[in-house]
Structure formats: C-alpha cells, structure tokens
C-alpha cells in the first residue's frame, strides 16, 4: 500500500506579515492569498522492518532510523521528524515503521510557503494512512504548532491554512492563535485575467525567511507607534483593498494596491529588499508593470508583478538581463488532497 498526498503552494497577494506574532495577537492581522499549481508531495509506504526511512527527494537527503517513539531533532529533515513525533505523541502512542518520501515543486526559501506546505502534506498522508479524525482547521493548526512551537521555527500563520484550504482566501488572525478563513467567490473572468496579468519571477536566490521574520517580530514588540507596526497597519488595509477589488472586478486597481503594499512592506524589517530587488522592481515598473511585491518574507526568492493589457511581454524582455526565471502557474481551487494506492 502507498499513501499519497499533495498540497498547493501559495501566492501572498496582500497583508503579508500581519499574521506574525505579536502583531496578530495585539492588533489582529488580515491576509489575502491564493494557491497555485505548484505542490508539495508526501508518500508513505508502511513497512514491517522496524525502521523509519525519511527521504526528501528534491534535495536528495535520506536517513534510515530505528522506529522509536521520538526522533531526535538534529538539524536533518526536521519537518519530517517533527510531524512524526507529534503523530505518535497525539495519536498512535507507539512507534510506526514506514518509508516517507517528500518532494516540493519549488525550492525552500523561495517565498511560496514551502516549509509549511510540506508539513501540511505530511500530516495529510499520516491522517489518510491512520484514519485520523482531523478537519481542515485541525490540520492547519497542527502544522502551525509543529513548526512554530515544537521546532521553534519563526514564521506566520497563513501558509498552513492556505495549503490546507486552497483557493482564494481572505484570512483573519487574532490572539490565542484564532484564525478565520473566508473563501472568496471571485468570478472566473476575474481570476483568468488576474492569472494572465500576474508574472511570477524567481530572482535566482533563496533566503532564510526565519531571520527576517524574527526581526519583524522584534520590531512589533517595541512600543506602539513604531515604524514596523504602522507599516503592518497599512498592509492590513491593503488586504481589505485587494479583497474588494477582486470581488468587484476592479482589476485596474490591483497594480497600485500591490505597489502600495510593497512600499510599506519594506518598512517592517531590514533585509526584506536589497539593491538588486529594488532594481528588478523598478525595471519591471518602467516596462509596464503597475505594481508588484516580493513573495513571502522577502530577501530573495520569487517576486510577482501585475502587468495589465499586454505589458507582460515587455516586462519579460526587460528582466531577461537579470538572469532570473519566469514560472508558469495557474490558480487552484483545492487544498490538501490525499489518497491511497
């Protein structure tokens, strides 16, 4: 028997960073995101040899361990081990023997929520295998706890919920880890046009998002009125602006809304942008893009640009000298999916 799962990566369109504590705990956060046709995959093959084989195929990393109740977190394949440890602790109460293989369509550190998405996919595979009574909110919250509490990885809350629920969602974040996911019913013509006008561009570099997010969290914890908090307030406004524009078909406003958010996003912490990213952004703007942003925490990875009418081709040509790569994608409606063979 083989148990399989896949979960989609996401584009953060507005409000990024307002899901990070302590901002979301104190002020409440809001984010609009959408999942795309890039996935994280997990495959479980049960065995009876008393061993656990962990294989991250995309980075060619393998570990073979004895099947114990707790796998030591030693800096190797931590997400895979972290999920297993919680599954045993919360559900099976005894060791499991299996081979777990994972793969992600985008490199870690690319800004599309890869770490959280693979965590969700692994949880989904275990839930399918063991018939665990977990709903969508349960899976997303468990993924959040594994990453942020068990493994002490800095980050926000949106990625786990985007991967689990899928589609276009307006998400609200409050204290005590309360999250409300509001699916958006956007007309197909609008999503088709959005997909045509959005360019997904990989800068050719990855980044350690945890370092940037740690700086954001430290800035949020300072006294009220600091620059980072005020910038986050503006990004929360941006999420509401983006929601209204998408629902009402005011697509001509999307570039300006992205540009508004980008300028405020850079005020949240050092390292979000750099001279190369700024040059790429300004080159895209001069070539026809009306706005854009870095995806995720910043510092590298993917950028998105909104290119209305037929300007996408001019932007593609203008960014060619920077040596990055444009990635084709489509928006997806489904989140985490699991099945057995």
Image: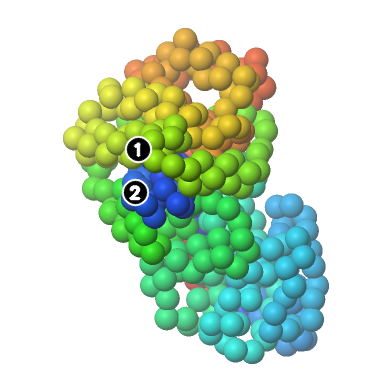
Name the spot of residue 255 as percent of width and height, x first. Answer: 36, 24
Q: Which residue position holds label 1?
A: 233
Outermost residue to the top: 286
- In this picture, residue 52 sits left or right of residue 192: right
Q: Any mark on residue 27, and which?
A: 2
Quadrant in the rendering for residue 196: top left
Q: Is residue 24 above or below residue 280?
A: below
- In this picture, residue 149 sits left or right of residue 68: left
Residue at image position (61%, 61%) is: 152
- In this picture, residue 311 sits left or right of residue 105: left
Q: Is residue 89 above or below residue 16?
A: below
* Residue 219 at least partly seen: yes
Q: Is residue 150 above or below residue 34?
A: below
Residue at image position (44%, 32%) is: 227
> For the residue labelled by badge 2, is the local secondary structure a helix, a strand or a loop?
loop
Outermost residue to the front: 223
- In the depicted view, which residue is nearer to us: 191 or 12? 12
> For the residue labelled by badge 1, is the local secondary structure a helix, a strand or a loop?
helix
Quadrant in the rendering for residue 309: top left
Q: Who comes first in sequence, dot 1 or dot 2?
A: 2
Image quarter hosting the N terminus: bottom right
Residue at image position (53%, 13%) is: 283
In this rendering, the count of numbered labels is 2
């Amino acid at each position: 028997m083989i148990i399989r799962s896949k979960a989609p990566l996401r584009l953060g369109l507005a409000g990024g960073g307002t899901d990070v504590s302590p901002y979301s705990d104190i002020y409440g956060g809001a984010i609009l995101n959408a999942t795309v046709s890039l996935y994280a995959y997990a495959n479980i093959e049960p065995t009876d040899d008393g061993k656990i084989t962990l294989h991250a195929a995309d980075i060619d990393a393998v570990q073979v361990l004895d099947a114990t109740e707790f796998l030591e977190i030693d800096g190797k394949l931590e997400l895979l081990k972290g999920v297993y440890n919680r599954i045993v602790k919360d559900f099976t109460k005894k060791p499991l023997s299996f081979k777990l293989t994972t793969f992600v369509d985008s490199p870690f550190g690319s800004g599309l929520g890869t770490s959280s998405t693979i965590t969700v996919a692994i949880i989904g595979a275990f839930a399918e295998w063991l018939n665990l009574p977990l709903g969508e909110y349960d899976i997303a919250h468990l993924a959040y706890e594994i990453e942020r509490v068990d493994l002490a990885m800095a980050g926000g809350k949106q990625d786990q919920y985007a991967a689990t629920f899928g589609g276009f969602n307006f998400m609200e974040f409050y204290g005590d880890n309360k999250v409300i996911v509001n699916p958006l019913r956007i007309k197909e013509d609008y999503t088709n046009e959005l997909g045509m006008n959005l360019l997904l561009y990989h800068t050719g570099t990855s980044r350690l998002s945890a370092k940037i997010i740690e700086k954001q969290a430290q800035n949020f914890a300072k006294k009220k009125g600091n620059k980072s908090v005020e910038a986050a307030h503006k990004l929360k406004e941006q999420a509401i602006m983006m929601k209204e524009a998408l629902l009402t078909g005011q697509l001509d406003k999307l570039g300006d809304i992205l540009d508004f958010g980008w300028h405020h996003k850079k005020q949240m912490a050092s390292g979000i942008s750099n001279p190369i990213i700024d040059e790429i952004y300004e080159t895209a703007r001069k070539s026809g893009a009306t706005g854009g942003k870095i995806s995720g925490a910043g510092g590298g990875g993917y950028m998105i640009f909104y290119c209305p009418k037929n300007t996408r081709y001019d932007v593609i040509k203008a960014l060619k000298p920077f040596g990055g790569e444009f990635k084709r994608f489509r928006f997806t409606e489904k989140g985490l999916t699991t099945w057995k063979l």
